[in-house]
Image (cartoon, helix red, strand yellow):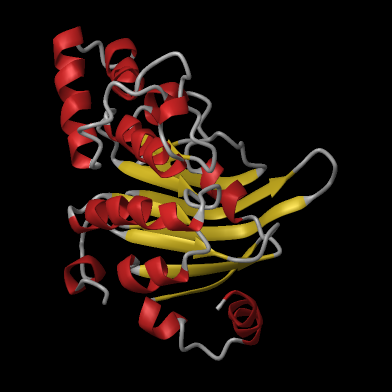
């Protein structure tokens, strides 16, 4: 259920995307006037068929993908303004990818410690405490000394989530975080994400996990052919008679 406090919040949206367009050099119009606001503490889930532009849109929210036109603000900072220090902004936007992208020569603890030391300039003891606390939080207290090759896919993804949290982000972006996992490992990653949602983390999640969308999302967004077709609360979304959405849900449910 949507939290009424979130619905009625007078705070400005943490993320404001307005009429975002992305045209690739080959002429592919990947995003077409996509507009979306995300409130602090809100969980927004984006679903849609392959090639619909959902991952491209997610990547524009920290400018891993530049936009052709439109405007994106993060906490009132215009990401499309050439004067904006985008690397500084990215420190506040955690991103969890399909691939885990862990450093193979570092342990789980070392992977999580690295960014706080390099970017936040934490001392080694400070970074170790941060990493230890976060690995405990994601259920990996007994795997801190393991290298990625000694971790399951689900465990590696949980390390990746802890690594993102170590930067104390204002928002976490998830790009199909369970799609590379064996089915039995999906639940352990989703459980961590559910706990983050309960704790009030602002999250934008691209996923095909419809159960997660039903249970955790404040809003569910459907994209197709580069357009934001529909956004509703989960209750309304999954009972919508929108024909394009119904065709998609008929294939994935």
Name the residue at 32% across, 71% down.
215
Question: From the image, which quarter does the N terminus lie in?
Answer: bottom left
Residue 204, position as x, y percentages in the image: 41, 53
In the rendered image, residue 127, in percent from the top left (x then y), is placed at 20, 17
In the rendering, at what x and y percent does residue 116 appear? 28, 18
Residue 12: in sight, yes or no?
Answer: no
**Placement of 64 over or under 125, stated as above or below:** below
Q: Is residue 190 left or right of residue 40?
A: right
Residue at (37% x, 58% y) in the render: 187
**Most distant residue in the front direction:** 150
The total number of labels drawn is 0
> Is residue 188 depicted above or below 144 in this figure?
below
In this view, the residue in front, 89 or 142, is 142
Which quadrant: the C terminus?
bottom right
Q: Residue at x 53, y 26 (%)?
A: 82
Q: Is residue 160 left or right of residue 67?
A: left
Q: Is residue 62 above or below residue 114?
A: below
Give the residue furthest to the right. Answer: 26
Identify which residue, 131 or 72, lies in the foreground: 131
Examine the rendering and report whether any part of residue 158 can be seen.
yes
**Residue at the spot 50% in from the left edge and 29% down from the top edge:** 101
Position of residue 13 measured from the top left corner of the image (x, y, whole percent): 32, 54
Q: Is residue 193 left or right of residue 128?
A: right
């Amino acid at each position: 259920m949507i939290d009424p406090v979130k619905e009625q919040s007078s705070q400005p949206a943490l993320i404001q995307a307005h009429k975002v367009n992305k045209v690739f050099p080959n002429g592919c119009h990947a995003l077409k006037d996509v507009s979306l606001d995300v409130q602090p503490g809100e969980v927004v889930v984006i679903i849609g068929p392959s090639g619909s532009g959902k991952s491209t849109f997610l990547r524009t929210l920290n400018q891993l993908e530049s936009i052709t036109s439109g405007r994106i603000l993060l906490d009132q900072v215009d990401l499309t303004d050439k004067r904006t220090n985008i690397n500084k902004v990215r420190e506040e936007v955690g991103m969890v990818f399909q691939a885990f992208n862990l450093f193979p020569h570092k342990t789980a603890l070392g992977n999580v410690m690295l960014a706080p030391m390099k970017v936040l300039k934490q001392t080694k003891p400070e970074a170790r405490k941060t990493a230890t606390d976060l690995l405990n939080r994601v259920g990996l207290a007994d795997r801190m000394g393991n290298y990625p090759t000694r971790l399951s896919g689900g465990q590696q993804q949980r390390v990746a989530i802890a690594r993102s949290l170590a930067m104390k982000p204002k928002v976490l972006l998830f790009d199909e975080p369970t799609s590379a996992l064996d089915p039995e490992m999906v639940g352990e990653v989703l459980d961590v994400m559910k706990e983050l949602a309960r704790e009030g983390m602002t999250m934008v999640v691209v996923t095909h996990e419809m159960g997660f969308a039903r249970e955790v999302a404040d809003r569910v967004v459907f994209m197709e052919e580069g357009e934001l077709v529909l956004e509703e609360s989960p209750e309304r979304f999954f009972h919508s008679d929108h024909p394009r959405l119904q065709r998609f849900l008929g294939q994935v449910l």
